[in-house]
Image: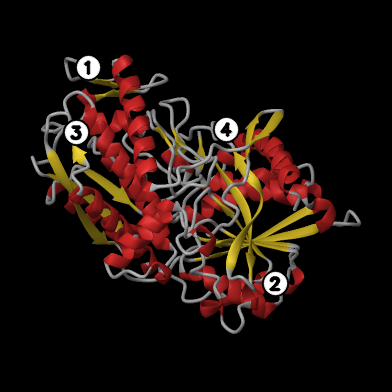
Amino acid sequence: MKRGRTAAVLAGVLALALVAGACGGDDSDDSAGGASTTAAGAATTATSPGSTSTTAPQAQPTSMEAWETLWANERAAIVKRIKDNKWGRSPDGKTLTGPEGFTVDLTKCPAGWSDTEGLSDTEIKVGQTLPQSGAAADYGNVGKAMATLFDDYSNKGAFKDSLGKTRKINYIVKDDSYDPARTIPLTDELLDSEHVFAVSTLGSPSTMKTYDKLNQRCVPQPFAQTGHPAWGDPVNHPWTTGLALAYTTEAVLWGGFIDQHFAELSPGGEKITVASLVSNNDFGNSYDLGFRAYIDQSPNKAKIEYASEKIEPTAPTVTDAMTTLAAKKPAVFISMVFSSYCTQVVTAAAQNGIQQDAKYLFVGQVCPGTTYVKKEVVGGDGAASDKWWQFNGGTKELNDPNQFSDPYIAYVRGLLQAKGIDPKSSSTLGSGVGYAWPWMQSLIIAGQLDGGLTRSNLLVTLHSFDMTNPYALPGIRAVVNGNKDAYYTEGGVFQKWNVAKQAWEIQGNVIDLSGKSKNCAWDQAAAVCK
């Protein structure tokens, strides 16, 4: 791929296509970090409908001291903006306001609601549901990494608020085995028995089953560990925010890539087949419906046959569904599954002919880093992972040797190793790193506002965030803006697996689609954004 040309062409296509893609999706899995990358200094492509430009990203700090200085300045700017605009809880305590018309009616919170529940003079109780057992048990490593970073910042006294109270995070994790039926009572337990300050959930099905309740009870649900577009709904679900690139946006990027390469895929103008294996839950359906929405408006739609097979998220193997798809001899194959199924798909494609027949194969961002494609898991010399691509939602990678000199990567790897955790044991540790950082920064900012740390101050912070994420590639910022822009991450980079190097290599420039993903008032019955 030609780096600048591909990014610019894709950006131009995608800026116009995101409306279609963002409005046709359903659920998700986990995701927010851990995709392995090289060439971290890639340029950024900024987009707007009908125009594109490419600029070099601002150089990132070269030491942890410099990072901390940058974050202190960025936090101060957010605090100043909030105070200057007099956002926050009204004097009568009835209304919470923020940027771009962001408003929450606090009188609708339940009787006995407390703005400081889960806080003591020394502690912040944060509840978490995620799988530590079952088919998705690898995502338990998200919690391990978050706990490691929370402990480090807590021990440094980072969470000192404007009232002079210094607290530590008490991170309470419950194992839901990626089963939303278990997530519901565990969330109740966190709310009613543990009395947590805020709740974190992993997975679209689990988050979808709990976000109505948490919003009705006015409990923050920051940085849901899933890329479902529904978390971009500051009007109807202001207490829930996401972090990862929306799966529907990722699906649009896949579609744009296919259109960009269509002449190569169909040199004689013949019809091609694009096949996908889809997890039959909110997560997989989000990808599937988003991709279908893109194909419906593609200039090549008459020449694309889209074939998909669905598997249950508890299925023991993917073999039968992948065999069915192999018979289609797809020119492009897309994996819309998660966790251990990621590796199963890669190995099945090598065995049933899909890898040989397809020119391009894609694994989703929910299969981050090296964990699911390295030769130790696919077997032999690792050739089964050849030809696989991924759209990385803008994150660095803990286990990419090219990034070991990055000060934040070195810092986090050192923390994990000091806890007896091998960074190479799972790339989803990187996802936890990606989620922990905005959690910690938001708690610090909220504590610096008038009145100290409260749920209200945290909520205003979450909808006013604008900082440089150290686990993001240069050119990808974590930015939201009230009711105008509810998505923190809107961009990333294509990458291809190098079997010889056992690493993902960046293909093209970073694609920045900031502000292009439309907010999503999710209609669960119709499975679309209204």
Which residue carries the number 3 mark? Answer: 453
Q: Residues within 10 Å of mark 2 (few under 14, many from 20)?
A: many
Residue type, mark 2 in image: Gln
Check whether the beta carbons of the residues at disc 2 and disc 1 lie within 8 A of each other.
no
Estimate the x, y position of residue 246 in percent, counting from the top left.
Answer: 51, 45
Q: Residues within 10 Å of mark 3 (few under 14, many from 20)?
A: many
Nearer the observer, disc 3 or disc 2?
3
Nearest-to-viewer mark from 3 and 4 = 3
Name the one closer to the observer, 26 or 422: 422
Residue 516 numbered tag = 4
Question: 3 or 178, which lies in front?
Answer: 3
Instruction: Place residue 144 in its image quadrant.
Output: bottom left
Which residue: 35% across, 37% down? 69
**Residue tagged 1:** 90
Q: Which structural element holds mark 2?
A: helix
Identify the residue at image location x=32%, y=67%.
417
**Mark 3 vs 4: CB contact within 8 A:** no
Residue at 57%, 44% in the rendered image: 249
Q: Residues within 10 Å of mark 4 (few under 14, many from 20)?
A: many
Residue 92, horizontal then vertical, whole percent: 16, 15
